[in-house]
């Protein structure tokens, strides 16, 4: 096992390389069995190969690659499959276009589409096999790390422990204690990985430095100073190293391109999803005869208010001024499906076309929530520095019931790292939200749900 541990990087590289070779080879070998020139040394085959590799590399950078040992198998399979299928589609269309010539086709036609389905089936099968195999090998070599959670209350403990517990192959929770426990340093010493969560800044600095001194893996939740530090850079004032955190805002050129993208994307979306929206409107009307849409005041850049459009998913007599819980009886039958697959959000392309929202940006919150969250978290107002959006970090990485503070962190990460390329990546990654619909639309817990985790030793 010690030899395997030392060679694990080589093993992962071998698995990864083999999988990528299978993905590329399956496309060209399958089509080469019907079209000899695909496997020959020609300009067309060369251009097709370069196109496939470039698109595959670009989409993997968007969705993620062979991240075994870091993610669960299902997210890796979804990400790699999406990246591969996009590379297949782009190369196939290019292949069909290049086939229009005097020696082959006189007009554009889809060349052997059943071959493309065979290729995709082989590739997805290979991805599934190699991902499960890779994670099996990795976690056989690397047993779960003994970890402890150090936090400030059992409410905070449950907020983080339930997340860690989903990664049992990576982490084995052995201790859960209060940061003021007299045994806190002994607990740190007997664990490999330390989670510091929701701890006062002064105490967190002490524990963080202790963990660093004794070579412990450290995880801790974001605070505002961490957000500022991520967007900062190192600067030398003569021989004095300092941290430089420069205030960022969109340039005039970025604003123009972003608005142009919003207009084009919203127009295309309304045309493409128009038939689906008509069907949804009909189903909503048939269920209870009520209004198809509902409008609600939401806050966007600078705290300005606008009326957001959504398909109605709740009973008309229900209150829309409080968040949905897991046992909520206000949701209609058709509303459950509209919410599950985010179809209720489609009318917001109208808001985007009108300039009230952007395709990418922090989710515009209900006015009541903005007031409530800002009272509890003054930093919540920082997310109003940019226009609200239909999708973004918080919508992709988070869930409906993600805590306001975690949503704020995700939104501020977007604001601090904004670029047009980031917008493009987030738009493409939005597809993954539909593939994990049951997780992403998870509602807030009901009032009667008890705490599952408790401190392993009482605070004296």
Image (spheres, rainbow, N blue to C red):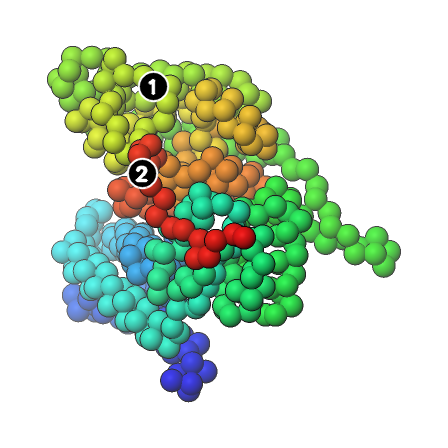
Which badge, 2 or 1, comes first in the chain's sequence?
1
Instruction: Measuring from the top left, give residue 329's x and y in whole percent.
Output: 22, 25
Q: Residue furthest right?
A: 238
What residue appears at the point 41 percent right and 39 percent down from the top-left corner?
Answer: 402
Q: Residue furthest front?
A: 460
**What's the mark number on residue 122?**
none
Instruction: Measuring from the top left, give residue 242's x and y in whole percent.
Output: 77, 52
Visible in this render: residue 167? yes
What residue appears at the point 30 percent right and 44 percent down from the top-left corner?
Answer: 439
64 or 190, nearer to the observer: 190
Q: Name the mark nearer the viewer: 2 or 1.
A: 2
What residue appears at the point 64 percent right and 44 percent down from the top-left corner?
Answer: 225
Instruction: Measuring from the top left, give residue 245's x and y in whole percent.
Output: 70, 44
Q: CA distance from mark 2 to mark 1?
A: 23 Å
421 or 411, nearer to the observer: 411
Quadrant of residue 138 in the image?
Answer: bottom left
In the displayed structure, would residue 332 be above or below residue 148? above
459 or 55, nearer to the observer: 459
Element type at mark 1: loop
Residue with the mark numbered 1: 320
Quadrant of residue 287 in the image?
Answer: top left
Element type at mark 2: loop
In the displayed structure, would residue 420 be above or below residue 283? below
What residue appears at the point 25 percent right and 53 percent down from the top-left corner?
Answer: 96
- Count of numbered circles on the image: 2
**What's the mark number on residue 449?**
2
Q: How dense is the environment of label 2, judged by Cα within 10 Å: few (below 14), some, or many (20 and up)?
A: few
């Amino acid at each position: 096992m010690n030899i395997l541990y030392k060679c694990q990087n080589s093993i992962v590289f071998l698995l990864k390389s083999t999988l990528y070779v299978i993905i590329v080879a399956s496309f060209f070998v399958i089509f080469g069995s019907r079209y000899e020139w695909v496997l020959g040394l020609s300009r067309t085959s060369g251009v097709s190969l370069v196109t496939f590799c470039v698109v595959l590399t670009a989409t993997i950078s968007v969705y993620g690659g062979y991240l075994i040992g870091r993610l669960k198998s299902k997210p890796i399979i979804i990400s790699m499959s999406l990246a591969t299928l996009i590379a297949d589609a782009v190369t196939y269309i290019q292949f069909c276009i290049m086939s229009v010539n005097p020696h082959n086709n006189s007009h554009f036609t889809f060349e052997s589409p059943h071959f493309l389905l065979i290729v995709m089936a082989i590739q997805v099968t290979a991805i599934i096999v190699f991902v499960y195999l890779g994670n099996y090998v990795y976690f056989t070599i690397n047993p779960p790390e003994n970890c402890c959670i150090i936090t400030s209350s059992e409410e905070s403990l449950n907020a983080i422990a339930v997340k860690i517990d989903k990664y049992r192959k990576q982490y084995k929770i052995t201790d859960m204690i209060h940061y003021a426990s007299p045994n806190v340093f002994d607990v740190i010493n007997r664990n490999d990985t330390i989670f510091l969560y929701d701890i006062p800044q002064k105490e967190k600095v002490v524990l963080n430095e202790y963990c660093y001194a004794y070579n412990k893996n450290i995880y801790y939740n974001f605070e505002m100073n961490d957000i500022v530090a991520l967007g900062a850079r190192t600067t030398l004032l003569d021989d004095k190293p300092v941290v430089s955190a420069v205030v960022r805002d969109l340039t005039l050129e970025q604003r123009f391109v972003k608005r142009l993208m919003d207009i084009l994307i919203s127009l295309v979306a309304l045309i493409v999803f128009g038939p689906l929206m008509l069907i949804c409107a009909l189903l909503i009307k048939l269920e209870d005869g009520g209004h198809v849409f509902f409008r609600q005041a939401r806050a966007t850049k600078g705290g300005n208010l606008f009326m957001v459009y959504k398909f109605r998913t709740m009973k008309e007599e229900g209150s829309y001024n409080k968040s949905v819980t897991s046992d909520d009886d206000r949701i209609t039958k058709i509303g459950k499906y509209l919410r599950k697959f985010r179809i209720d959000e489609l009318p917001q392309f109208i808001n985007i076309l009108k300039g009230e929202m952007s395709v990418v940006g922090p989710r515009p919150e209900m006015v009541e929530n903005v007031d409530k969250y800002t009272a509890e978290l003054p930093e919540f107002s920082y997310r109003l520095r940019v226009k609200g959006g239909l999708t973004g970090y918080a919508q992709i990485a988070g869930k409906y019931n993600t805590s306001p503070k975690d949503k704020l962190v995700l939104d501020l990460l977007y604001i601090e790292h904004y670029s047009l390329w980031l917008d493009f990546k987030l738009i493409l990654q939005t597809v993954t939200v539909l593939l994990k619909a049951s997780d992403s639309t998870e509602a807030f817990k009901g009032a009667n749900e008890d705490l599952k985790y408790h401190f392993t030793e009482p605070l004296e």
